[in-house]
Image (cartoon, rainbow, N blue to C red):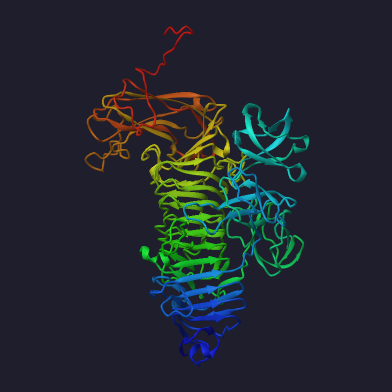
Amino acid sequence: MAALSSTQSGNFNSSATWGGATPADGDTFTINRGHKVTVNSDIRTTNGYGDIQLYGKLEIVNNGQFRLNGRIIIRGNGAGGYFVEGSNTTNGFLHMTAGSSIEIRGANADNHGLWMETEQHCQMILQGTQKNLNTNLSAATSIGGVYLPVDNASNWAEGDWVTVFNREEDYRVGGDEGFWVHDVDTVNNRIYIRQFVSPTATITGLLSNDLVVDNAKVFRVGYKIVYGTGSNRQTAEITAIDYNRNRLTTNATPSLSHIGETVYQTGAEKSHVDNSVVRRKATTVSTAISANTTTSVTVGNASDIAVGDVIVIDANNDNDTGWDYNTRHTVSSKSGNTLTLDRNVEQNIKVGSLVHILTRDVKVHAVDESSNTRPFILIERWTSSSGRNRVVILQDVWMKGLGRNTNSTYYAGLMMIGYASRYRDDSSNDGEHIQSRFDCAVFESPNNRSSYTGFATRDTREFLIRNCTSYRVERGYWLYSSNYNHKLFNNYASRCWYATCAIDSFYEPYATVQYFYGTRSDDYGMVISQLRENQDIRHNILLNHEQRPFGAFYSPDHIVFERIYMDGYRSFPYVGDANGKMVFLDSYITKNRWDWTSPTGTGVVYSNYGNAANSDRSNYYRTTGYTQFGDLLENNFEYDSHAEWYGGTLAIWDDSEKAWYCKQYNDANSGKFNSTYVPPNTTVRLSCDVKVQSGFTGTRPYLFAMSHRNQYAYGRWQTAYTGQTSGQDSTASNPDGIYGFRNMNQYSAAAVGAWETKTLTIDPQTKGYFLVYGITTTSTDIREEYFYMRDVELFFDSSPTITKTKSISRRAAVRSGFTRAKKRIGGTRL
């Protein structure tokens, strides 16, 4: 093996490029500053070339195929800035264009792959052609627009996932948007759109010029709606709603032909500049498939799918509750929009299931599918802002079989770490003229099925991941520690053995996750930790996950997640015990097809109960009243629907009962809780009505109250552990002490099938304290049943002196006993 060094620009396989030497299998190379070495043919050797120190430019162009048995190391720190051919002061640049490929060989110990150093003005731009159907906006659009005016609307189909974006955009704008195609007008070149997460209703009739729908509660005055297709298509704005009669008044005139149509919300939420890219992220299955019956699939439109392409068909159905499904196929033939595949479709597939194209014309692959072939792509960690002028763009690139190399967490297949360039339209600074990004790229099937594989980043600043597809990895998208103003738009992940999207840190106000579709994970659909403020996490779909669709950890109070669609999951979304209150606004969560919350009331996995894992810290004897708390407002898109989650108990407001419909998931000692400040020397009285399901014979719920002091022990073990196992209630406790108390009152058999009232009186304490109270269950007996509870009534015997504080979540009424004051109609007190 020889070590060659470039003497001029030229073809890689030309001896003149290397001063007269001919490249051979296993040789190593230095490409010097200012030299451009081009690969434009198939020069794959048996084993592959060795390490390449890249101070100049290595360009692999159409038909260029290269085999690497080492590392391509992109070097910088030359004084002259980005690469310029002929300049001996400029820096390293790895450039791949359409029709090129790199195959990489190397066992775990070899540490082979593409490597960018922590040196200035390095560039890695791997950029293929736009494989998926795409066009451009023919005019600028405004907020509320119901269609996209495009240069060419041909080949777009109903149900397509369409994305709109502008690559030359300031990172603070965040203008990417995702929609579903509702209908196409090819005469006027218009793509009519539905919002990415949209409420729906069915038109059941007409009343005058108003629409009567099966559920008007999911809409609001001012919404733009769309229904019908072709000549029957109608767009309108809702001007009034009669919720009692399910009646929508709009500014359009419907017809009898619209009865039976589905109403969707339309209207762009962002403005888009003229000539923005309009790209199909995925098309959909148009004919349902039964498992193992056919090699054929018909899609909405196959114009961008060719024979030989690799596709993934989303395993979207009601009955398959696992995650590790092989949904990857190669197209062996094509007739119109019908594709013949290399093997049978193994799962039941609904109409509307997504079909993604994995094939790209720039490829970075492992040389084979051996589990011991573990190359990777690493942009080395650089946490100084002087790294801002590194440029990293992976656009329309297909990465397969990379990693997971076990020698470092960073060798995870694809890892972007630290600073890189960003785009600011008000700056001429070096490193702020181009947006570094993963853009329309594909990462799939690492050879070593281990931790952390997927699109991974750490310590990034203003980095962007857009329109990417991640399949059969551990973490579809992994933001590992300290990512600032990181943006994810219109990404898809499936068949992930930990999470389709895992965010370990999300800092600064421009960070956002929007239009994400994650399906078929083992543990989590989306899991988010270390949110530091209310960033935009909205319009995300988490569908068909074997365990939890969502988890949140270590985030502050009242973080809001908006328009999140969750369906098909075994375990209720997990709110970590170290979170503040989590708010899910205008989201679809509690109609899960797989458990008792399904619209039919019977789930395909759990028919009359649900599943969840809660922390012991959310049990009644340790909770703050809001531990693992999630507030579900405008639940399932309905304007007046409200539910609360307490880690082990889901409480859904039932307006007909004027009470909370409560179900325990799997652990005893959960319930619906609250807390309040109690002033010194104040008697507290609690009262609550409960009704348990008729026929219930197990352990009935309790009304309880506890001091926050010594809450777990509530008076036990005051001087020793042995022999001091009895707790104390508020009467027995020393009111001047700190040993705490617990009062409990169990509901009797009278509460089975009928309302029963229970009360508690809490004796005054010398010091002010916080009281945790509510309804708890101490047995899993009630897991398969339900109970109703009205709000706990809270009375003080005197007015508190402190009232204006957010720490008091609910004001107590002032009353000397449990009896309510009554008035005659004339106002005379009884």
Residue 33's x, y, as percent? Answer: 44, 80
Picture quarter containing residue 679?
Answer: top left
Residue 161's x, y, as percent? Answer: 63, 53
120, above or below 291, in the image: below
Q: Residue furthest bottom?
A: 20
Q: Which one is in front, 63 or 495?
A: 63
Residue 19's x, y, as percent? Answer: 48, 91
Question: Going by the image, does 149 lie left or right of 771?
Answer: right
743, above or below 524, in the image: above
Q: Which one is in front, 686 or 586?
A: 586
528, above or below 628, in the image: below
User: How many tags in the picture?
Assistant: 0
Picture quarter containing residue 743?
Answer: top left
Residue 598's x, y, as percent? Answer: 60, 41
Whether residue 818 can be seen here: yes
| Quadrant position of the C terminus in the picture | top left
Whether residue 666 can be seen here: no
User: Residue at left 30%, top 27%?
Assistant: 802
Q: Which one is in front, 827 or 29?
A: 29
User: Residue at left 44%, top 39%?
Assistant: 670
Question: Going by the image, does 817 lie left or right of 168?
Answer: left
777, above or below 185, in the image: above
